[in-house]
Image (cartoon, rainbow, N blue to C red):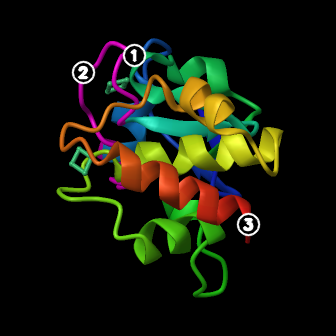
Amino acid sequence: MVLNVNGVTREVAVEPDDALLTVLRDQLELTGPKYGCGEGACGACTVLINGAATRSCITAVSSVAGKEVMTIEGLEKNGKLHAVQQAFLKTDAFQCSYCASGMSMSTVAVLKNSATPSDDAIVKAMNGNICRCGTYPYIMKAIKLASQS
Ligand code: FES
Ligand code: FES
């Protein structure tokens, strides 16, 4: 099967039901997306599919044929971090960073839908992304900062 990941065409040998997360991590060595719950409840595995935040642990690889998959590895351009990544760094938002990839990709999707979302809209959109370290106030600060850049 052929996948379009981070703007590059990649060929992978998969079963149709294989989880996209497993294919990304184990075959394409894109280890930014993390395995947390494995059942769509924590957001650690979030990637963008045609720009929409998607839980890759519960997404069959066959369902993304012909679609654009973006992982956190695809955010940086020409050596420059994406504004969302810069905002998370500037606010020192993470502790262990296990949630960072998923939080970043969900934030990119949130800001794509609305450049200056309200606090309520951010909380609602980010609700499925869990941070075990509980750095939510800093994550909120980072998202606000990214929305101003
Ligand atoms: S690992 Fe996919 S949502 Fe938790
Ligand atoms: S910083 Fe540790 S899970 Fe979010």
Q: Is residue 138 above or below residue 80?
A: above
Q: Please state which of residues 87 and 68 is positioned toward the viewer in this rendering.
A: 87
Q: Secondary structure at mark 2?
A: loop
Residue 112 point in image, percent of width and height: 79, 46
Badge 3: how crowded within 10 Å, few (<14), some, or many (20+)?
few
The residue shown at (43%, 43%) is 102
Residue 33 in view of the camera: no
- Asked whether 37 falls inside the magenta stretch, the response is yes
Residue 69 point in image, percent of width and height: 64, 42
Q: Label 1, label 2: how many angstroms apart (C-alpha)?
A: 7 Å
Q: Is mark 2 within 8 Å of ligand 1?
A: yes
Instruction: Identify the mark at residue 40; answer none if there is no mark.
Output: 1
Sequence-earlier tag: 1 or 3: 1
Circles 1 and 2: CB atoms closer than 8 Å: yes
Q: Is mark 1 within 8 Å of ligand 1?
A: yes
Sequence-earlier tag: 3 or 2: 2
Residue 30 point in image, percent of width and height: 39, 54
The residue shown at (50%, 17%) is 60
Q: Please state which of residues 25 and 132 is positioned toward the viewer in this rendering.
A: 132
Residue at mark 2: 37
Residue segment shown in magenta: 26-44
